Image (cartoon, coloured by chain):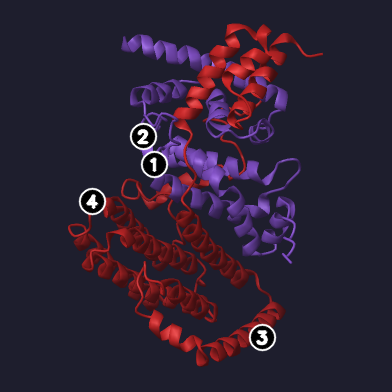
Amino acid sequence: MKNRYNSRSDILDECLRSIQEGKATLEDCLRAHPDAGPELRNLLETAVNTWNLMAPFGPSPEYVKTSEARLRRRMQAVQKTSNAQGANRSQSVSWGILRAAIVVLVMAVLLGSGWGVFSASAQAIPGDALYPAKLEFEQVRLALSWTAAGDVSLLAQYSDLRLEEIQLLVNKNRDRDLLEGIKQYEGTLDLLDVALQSLPQTSDLNQLQAIQVRLSVHLSILENLRSLVPSSAQEALDRVIDRSRQSQGLIQNLRLGKGPVSTPPGQQKKDTKQISPTEREQKEKTKTPPGQQKKETEKPLKKTD
Amino acid sequence: MDATPLPELSDSILVARAKGGDTGAFGQLYQRYVENIYRYLFVRMGDTKDAEDLAEEVFFRSFQSLGRYRERGLPFSAFLYRVAHNMLIDYYRSQKMNVPLSASEPKPDSLRPLDDHVIRDEELKTLRVAIDDLPSNYREVIILRVILSLPTAVVAKWMDQTEVSTRVLLHRALQMLRGRVREQNEKQI
């Protein structure tokens, strides 16, 4: 049997739902429950006022679209890494056949009408209509790469391209597209990190060194851009500078044979300078795996009545 | 004749497909839940850009952890919420501070407009301080059930409670919130 407290809670919740769905007003609810007393009015007023003042809009459709595309690319990169690590011989053979088929298909498409789009999109920058096509062609090239070293090499080239795009956007004063350009550069570094971490232990140290040098050039270019970008992009630029440093740190660790520092992209972008890689590794070890509550910080959301 | 739309696939089917490597299936889950996850993060962070960045990371991390997700009564949306909740804690830790709800003021244009189109800044500040001051489970139920207006059944699943105890929790949380708002107002006078 319900106690009095439960039934008052039920009425409160039911009234709030009706108001939020636009099916009733606060006064309608009070009239429907004359016995509920002034408490119902007080609590509903608090709830409705909180809802009115704090309910946020959802994300913009543009964000949802670009973020989903970026997420898919990152998921595919992760899959590629795990496929490379876990593939047995027979899987490699079937993947080889699939790739050969893709090569034939892509050649056919490029030789056909796709070639025009491909060449025209090469000069596209964020905000241009052909820019998504440019990224798609890059993804196809990446899919056709046979080795982790090949992936790393391509992604390093792509990071150069992303940086050039940022410079072009700054030169053309295309402030609105600049944030997207910076985001694309950041996303490419995420993919580069994933690819770097999947390199075999025996990987070419010269290749790693070349990429490290490349990234230090990036860093100086990005720092020079600080005085040129509008204030709206300053924070994003600072973040990407930290992000670039992280990638350099990862390469340094790989070169020294220390293994990768498992930092999820975008997670520690603001405190990279403040903690050492060793501290960061320890911090990562103590992280609660997703899907489990951090009981020491926030109490588990268990029964309270 | 109009083509009959295909029935929407259930979360369980999409999750199973995503576990098998179908990124498109995970993309559908993203489309289904990005709004709720983003709005939850926005309420806690108060900044569009930060909420957007973290929302994407929540989905990426969830995809990476999909192998560990077992349904067993825990809906996928609740799994996402827990990843988001944990990542928020990590985010605050990485900033080396405990960023309260009131520390970052959301831009008024990212909040749902009031009927009279007047943003009552002072009232909003008072409310945010009062919500910060609540115990964490009271704060969560206010955010999920009141601010995000999620159905009680969803809030109960996300918070791992029965619907009855979620309603009671909401009742108590609103009582305490009302008291805290009154205290804040008295302090200002």
Q: Badges 4 and 2: C-beta atoms under 8 Å apart?
A: no
In whole angstroms, how far apart are the C-alphas of marks 2 and 1?
A: 7 Å
The image position of residue A176, as x and y in percent, is 31, 59
In whole angstroms, how far apart are the C-alphas of marks 3 and 2?
A: 54 Å
Q: Residue at x 48, y 58 (%)?
A: A67
In this rendering, do the residues under marks 4 and 2 share a single chain?
no
Pointer 3 chain: A
In this rendering, do the residues under marks 4 and 3 share a single chain?
yes
**Category of crowding for the residue at label 3, using alpha-carbon neighbours closer than 10 angstroms: few (below 14), some (14–19), many (at least 20):** few
Q: Badges 3 and 2: C-beta atoms under 8 Å apart?
A: no
Q: Which mark is residue A97?
A: 3
Label 1 SS: loop
> Of label 4 and label 3, which has the lower sequence position?
3
Q: Which chain is purple?
A: B
In this rendering, do the residues under marks 3 and 1 share a single chain?
no
Q: Badges 2 and 1: C-beta atoms under 8 Å apart?
A: yes
Q: Colour of chain A?
A: red
Which residue carries the number 1 mark?
B47
Pointer 1 chain: B
Which residue carries the number 4 mark?
A231
Q: Residue at x 46, y 55 (%)?
A: A63
In whole angstroms, how far apart are the C-alphas of marks 3 and 1?
A: 48 Å
The image position of residue A70, as x and y in percent, is 49, 62
What's under tag 2, amino acid-wise? Ser
Q: Nearer the viewer, residue B104 or B85?
A: B104
Q: Which mark is residue B104?
A: 2
